[in-house]
Image (spheres, rainbow, N blue to C red):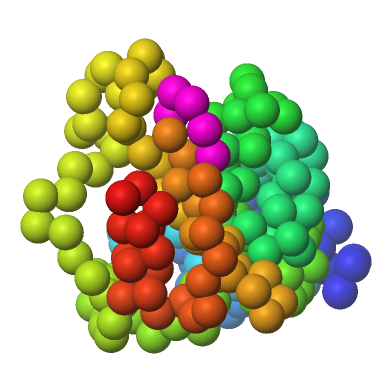
Amino acid sequence: MNTQTRQYKQLTQGKRYQIEALLGADYMQKEIAVSVGISESALSRELSRNASDDGYATESAHALASQRRVTATKFSKTDERYMPIIKKGLLLGWSPKNISFRMKVEVPDIALSHTTAYKRVATNKVLGVSLYKNLPRFGKRCCKGGKRKAGRITTPDLIDIPDRPAVVDLRSRLGDWDGDTIYGQGAHLVTLVDRKSRLTLGRIDTKHAEVVAESMIALIA
């Protein structure tokens, strides 16, 4: 398996020209793999990842592969800085939103939204095969569009973070709150952060939306 991976990584533009020519001559994939000097699985992977609807073209295939390497390197270097913080937060029972807040303190030059944290944890093998199970919403059933089916409370006049007034980001007034939940082993917390002054915690017995909502109302009453 390691040999196949190494062969695929060393696939050059010249070999891609060979692949294109042999495909055009109606050679079988097995014959092409032997001629080019790569495994059949590496050839199959190359065609599935870098061919277009119009077929396999060397220039576009090589450009796609090169861009993919650049993107992978970029993610890898960034992962080295924020993945340990994400891992620590998940093991402590933090939600991705809590982790995002912590990132602003420990690595302020890297912007990480809680949505990105979810995606990176779910797909990144650096954290280990099963760490994604520590996500607070792991295993929840979803319906079309990514909305949870049951128990969800909606707020009719809710304003999304990107649409909130600019004054909120200035932290210059009291009464602007950030709310979240923290799930641990046998215990759950509601966090309400007044953006100007303080952090308020409230313990809850369950993660049900109704209980969380009631707890938040009680904290700011």
In the image shown, does 3 or 23 lie closer to the viewer? Answer: 3
* Relative image position of residue 184 (x, y in whole percent): 67, 70
The answer to whether residue 101 is visible is yes
**Total labels drawn:** 0
Q: Residue furthest right?
A: 3
Question: Going 52% across and 33% down the picture, which residue do you hit?
Answer: 198
Q: In which quarter of the image is residue 174?
A: top left
Q: Is residue 172 above or below residue 145?
A: above
Q: Is residue 162 above or below residue 109?
A: below
Report whether 210 appears left or right of 77.
left
Question: Going 36% across and 14% down the picture, which residue do you hit?
Answer: 172
* Relative image position of residue 41 (x, y in whole percent): 70, 75
In the image shown, does 160 or 193 lie closer to the viewer? Answer: 193
Q: Quadrant of residue 166?
A: top left
Q: Is residue 104 above or below residue 214?
A: above
Magenta segment main secondary structure: loop
Q: In which quarter of the image is residue 108?
A: top right
On-image quarter of the N terminus: bottom right
The answer to whether residue 124 is visible is no
* Relative image position of residue 92 (x, y in whole percent): 74, 60
Q: Which residue lies furthest to the left in this view?
A: 156
In the image shown, does 91 or 170 lie closer to the viewer? Answer: 170
Question: Going 53% across and 79% down the picture, which residue do you hit?
Answer: 205
In the image shown, does 164 or 51 lie closer to the viewer? Answer: 164
Q: In this view, does 46 lie above or below 178?
A: below
Residues drawn in magenta:
195-199
Answer whether residue 69 is magenta in the image. no
Q: Which residue lies furthest to the front in this view?
A: 221
Question: Going 71% across and 77% down the picture, which residue do you hit?
Answer: 185
Report whether 55 appears left or right of 13.
left
